[in-house]
Image (cartoon, helix red, strand yellow):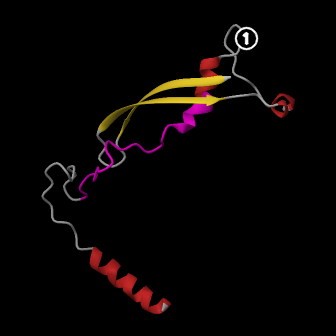
Amino acid sequence: MLLHVKAHVDAECARCLEPLSRDYDFEREYFVRDRDLDDPDFELPCNEKDCLDLEELAYQELIFEVPAVLLCSADCQGLCPICGKKKAAGCSCQPADDAAPADARLSILKQLLS
């Protein structure tokens, strides 16, 4: 059986918290294995007429393919930790100088390993 699902997801960007909307289109071959039928805990979803609910089956099989973390764009920089504005949209805060200690720790680690 070929399962085909169109999913619409309303969420927010994981970095800047802007609302976003995505459409996904999934398709996969699905088959019930004999060992599944022998398993007493295996149940195919049925509707109120006790017929196989293909929409629910497709949802159960393919929902895990929707990414758990969604971003509004690949280059989203997120929110400024100081002012809370989007970094790309007008944040004028100066970045904290936390790169120097990290670089110092990295150089010490490299010296110890060599």
What residue is rendered at 73% in x and 11% in y? 50
Q: Is residue 69 left or right of residue 58?
A: left
**SS at mark 1?**
loop
Q: Would you say residue 70 sits in the magenta stretch? A: yes
Q: Quadrant of residue 57?
A: top right
Q: Is residue 62 left or right of residue 45?
A: left
Q: Is residue 96 above or below residue 114?
A: above
Q: How many marks?
A: 1
Q: Is residue 36 above or below residue 88?
A: above
Identity of the residue furthest to the right in this view: 38
Q: Amino acid at mark 1?
A: Asp
- What span is in magenta? 60-81
Category of crowding for the residue at label 1, using alpha-carbon neighbours closer than 10 angstroms: few (below 14), some (14–19), many (at least 20): few
Horizontal and vertical percent position of residue 100: 28, 79
Q: Which residue bears the numbered disc 1?
A: 50
Question: Which sits in the foreground, 114 or 69?
Answer: 114
Instruction: Name the chief secondary structure element in magenta.
Output: loop
Q: Quadrant of residue 41?
A: top right
What residue is rendered at 29% in x and 40% in y? 18
Q: Quadrant of residue 39?
A: top right
Horizontal and vertical percent position of residue 40: 84, 30
What residue is rendered at 65% in x and 29% in y? 29
Q: Is residue 107 left or right of residue 33?
A: left
Which quadrant of the figure contains the N terminus? top right
What residue is rendered at 20% in x and 50% in y? 85
Q: Would you say residue 69 sits in the magenta stretch? A: yes
Identity of the residue furthest to the top in this view: 49
Horizontal and vertical percent position of residue 4: 56, 24
Q: Is residue 32 above or below residue 15?
A: above
